[in-house]
Image (spheres, helix red, strand yellow):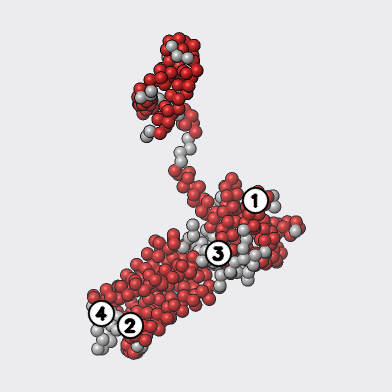
Amino acid sequence: MAQTLTLSTLTFAGRWVLLPQPTMGVTVIDKVLPTESTSASDQADRQRAAWMAAAQAGDQRAYTRLLSDSVALIRAVARRQGVPVDALDDVVQETLLAVHRVRHTFDPARSYDAWLSAIASRRAVDALRSHGRRDRREVHDELAIDHYADRDDASTGTEREQEAQRLREAIETLPPGQREAVEQLGLKERSLAEAAEQTGRRTGALKVNLHRALKSLRDRMHGEP
Amino acid sequence: MSDAPRHDALIDALGAQLTPVRRLPPPWLRTLGWLAVVAAIAAVLLQRYGAHTMLHRWQAAPDLCLAAFGAVTTAITAALAAFALAVPGRSIRWALLPVPSAVLWISASGMGCLRAHIPGMAVLDMREANHCLMFIISFSIPLSGLLIWLLRRAYPLRPVLTAVIVGLASAAASASLLEICHNVDAAASDLVMHALAVAIVVVANMAMGGRLLTKA
């Protein structure tokens, strides 16, 4: 098997080098100039067509072998379409999924390579398009983001003010014991012992109250719009 | 083969999901299937209207016969081209197949307006023309729909081009069907309506088919 795979890779390489520059979106493999490697790659193509025919009948071994064997060709097609190296694996995956979905459209009497190349080429074009769209929509200016991160912009101050107001209001609505705990321990930053002395409550009761207060404040601040 | 291991997990998963599939019949056979539906409609129309009006028109004006021949051939070749283009790896040159017959169809119908009218036959008025517009559109919608449904079983990699050809096929097919029950002579208004109907069908297919033809 290893031998077959290596042979097919080499013949791919031989073929792709000989291909003229693409003028249209989809490559027509039949246009390859006749060379010495043609018969060998034809044989490899026929082998893959036979594997696909077996896969159409449900042969899993032939199928996984065929898909592993297809990866190199898919990458070659995607590279020729100008897909960047870091996006090649995505195109390979998309193409493999498409092959799986439409495997019934393959006619074993025809070239498997041409069939696969057409699908891979389409997926490559789609990948390039979505890449282009993403690049247009997103702003890539890391320097600007570093230097002018949302610091001190006009709305930040207002938002902070509103947050504080909401928190004050929420604290007002707490039950007296809880409100006391928050005021003493949170806002005035007293220690438990000082707070206990000040309010005449036990430290354990203060802790429980603070805990409950924080929970209900958290619910209120996150729950409200 | 250093690339393959990275995709092993996916390949194994796809292998595990593999089920036998029914192979898609060749494009010509699928074309015959669609044409059988068109032929069935034609048979119904012929039974209802008879062939004598059609034959009389053709006898009196051979160019109309030529136009009808062009329409029928366009329907056949465009359907074949659409089915062929829906299979990955088929040459884009299939799209050129319906072009000669479409040219014949359009130019022969155009010629019809330039010659003398058939004696004793009414020239199309606007109401009739409207009727023929409705006829072509109402027949080409289901015919397009059927064609799109059939094509979705394949995998059209150029959905917009395929949709244009679908529109051409169904517009030509319904123009051919109209030939059977068209009892008026060709006139400029007739041609305009035909062109309008064909354009509506083709453009509607182009606009919608691009999405209808590609599976998510």
Please identify the quarter of the rendering in which residue A46 is found.
bottom right
Q: Is residue A153 above or below residue B184?
A: above
Question: Between marks 3 and 1, how big is the CA–CA gap?
Answer: 26 Å
Q: Residue B124 carries which label?
A: 4
Q: Nearer the viewer, residue B138 or A7?
A: B138
**If you read the primary sequence from the N terminus, does the residue marked by circle 4 or circle 1 appear first?**
1
Please identify the quarter of the rendering in which residue B120 is found.
bottom left
**If you read the primary sequence from the N terminus, does the residue marked by circle 3 or circle 1 appear first?**
1
Q: Residue, x 37% and y 79% (percent of image)?
A: B177
Q: Nearer the viewer, residue B21 or B80?
A: B21
**If you read the primary sequence from the N terminus, does the residue marked by circle 2 or circle 1 appear first?**
1
The residue that disc 2 covers is: B181
The residue that disc 1 covers is: B9
**If you read the primary sequence from the N terminus, does the residue marked by circle 2 or circle 3 appear first?**
3
The residue that disc 3 covers is: B88
Q: Residue, x 31% and y 82% (percent of image)?
A: B182
Q: Can residue A49 be seen in this view?
A: no
**If you read the primary sequence from the N terminus, does the residue marked by circle 3 or circle 4 appear first?**
3
Q: Are marks 2 and 3 in contact (CB under 8 Å)?
A: no
Q: What's under tag 3, amino acid-wise? A: Pro
Q: What's under tag 4, amino acid-wise? A: Leu
Which image quarter is the C terminus of chain A in?
top left
Q: Which chain carries label 4?
A: B
Q: Which chain carries label 1?
A: B
- Rendering coords of residue A197 (x, y %): 45, 9
Local secondary structure at mark 4: loop
Question: Between marks 3 and 4, how big is the CA–CA gap?
Answer: 45 Å
